[in-house]
Image: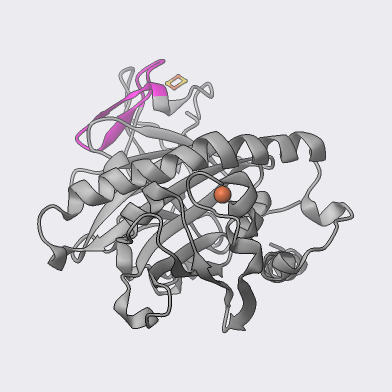
Amino acid sequence: MPFLRNAWYMAAWDYEVTAQAPLQRTLLNHRVALFRDADGAARATSAICPHRYASLGLGRLENGVLHCGYHGLGFDGSGACVHNPFGAPSKTMKLETWPVAEKYSAIWIWLGEPERADPALLPDFAFNDPAQAFVGKGYLNVAASYELEIENILDLSHIQFLHPTTLGSGSVSDGVYEWKQEGDAIWSNRKVIGEIVPEALALAMGLTPGEPSDRWIHTRWNAPANMAIFAGAVPTGRPQGEGRETPTGHFFTPETDTSSHYWYSIAFPQYIGPHGQAMADEQVDFLSLPFRTEDLPMLEEQQRNLGGRSLRDVRLGWLPGDAAGARARNLLYAMIDAEQAEGG
Ligand code: FES
Ligand SMILES: [Fe+2]
C-alpha cells in the first residue's frame, strides 16, 4: 500500500541529529541521511551516494559537509557536491533533499512536494516543547507496520491482557469507552472507575498502591500516525481536576511496508523543578519495558501472520474498542487515495 507523502513524519529525536556524524535511517523506504549543517540546522538528504551507491551513513561529517566513505566526494545540506578529491566538484552528481522542521524536541521530515511543507501543519505537541518541558525520550524499531501501531495505541483495551502487571488491570474491560472525531483528529477516550492499578503504575501516577482509583486515558491520533495519550488518575470518587494528567507522545513512521520507527516520550512541565528531567527519564524507562517486551513481540507476530499484507487487505473481526482505530485508518486510506488520484 502506498504511504501518505504530503505529511510530516518524525525522523529522529532532536539529540540524535548532530554536527559530528550522519545518522542514516530508512523512512518510507527512502534511505535518508540526517545531520546538522555548519549553522546547526537539521538537514535531510538521500543517504545514497550518486557515484557508486555507497551509503553516506558510513561516511563522515565535517563542517556540515557529508563526505562519502568510499571515494571521498563531499555534499552539503543542499545536496550539492562541494568537494571532489580528484578534481572540481561535480555539477551533475547531487543528492535528493527533503524539507525538515525541528519542533517539539523532534526532527520532522516531509517526503512529499517540498512547496507544501508547512511546519504549521504539525499537530500540537506543545507538551514536548523543550522550552517548557522535561521530556523523557524512547525509541524502538519494530518489525510491524505503522497501521498495527495505530491500532495498538487507539485501542488500549489491550492493556488488561497484554500488560497485566504494568499498565493494565482486570477492570479495564468494565470501563466506559467512547471515540469521537474533532477536525482532523480522532480521539479514543477510556475511563475506568474503582480500579486497582499495578503498584509501580500507582506510584508513577501519584496514587497510593492498593487503593481504588478512577483513571482516564484519552488518546489522540493525527495522520499519518502522530499520537498522544493524556492519562491521569484520582482516588476513586474525587474530581478529575485534582489529578495530575501526564501526556505521552507516540510517533510512528514507516521504515518499510512492514516495519516502523516508534518514538515515545513522557513529559513533565518545567515548573515542577529541576528533578523533572530525572523523573521523565525514569518514567520513560518504566514505559519501555512493556513496550519492548509485550507490545513489540505481539505486533511483530501480527505482522508475520499478515505477511506482506496491509490491514486494509484482510478481513478483520470487530470489538467495541476497534472503532477509533478503524476510523483513523479509514481517514488515512482516504487521504492516501486522494493523493494517489491527484498523481501523488
Ligand atoms: S560511492 Fe561515494 S564517492 Fe564513490
Ligand atoms: Fe500496549
Q: Residue at x 67, y 53 (%)?
A: 147
**Residue 306 vs residue 124: left or right?**
right
Query: What's the magenta region?
Result: 58-73
Query: Residue 87 sits in which quadrant?
Result: top left
**Which of the pair 114/104 is nearer the observer?**
104
Q: Give coordinates of residue 22: x percent, y percent.
A: 34, 32
Q: Give coordinates of residue 314: x percent, y percent.
A: 87, 52
Tell whether position 84 is magenta: no
Q: Residue furthest right?
A: 315
Query: Residue 327 sits in which quadrant?
Result: bottom right
Q: Give coordinates of residue 285: x percent, y percent.
A: 35, 41
Q: Give coordinates of residue 152: x percent, y percent.
A: 62, 54
Tell me if I can see residue 181 in this picture: yes
**Which of the pair 287/200 is nearer the observer?**
200
Q: Residue at x 39, y 68 (%)?
A: 232
**Residue 66 vs residue 29: left or right?**
left
Q: Residue at x 62, y 81 (%)?
A: 180
Quarter of the figure that contains the C terminus: bottom right
- Count the marks: 0
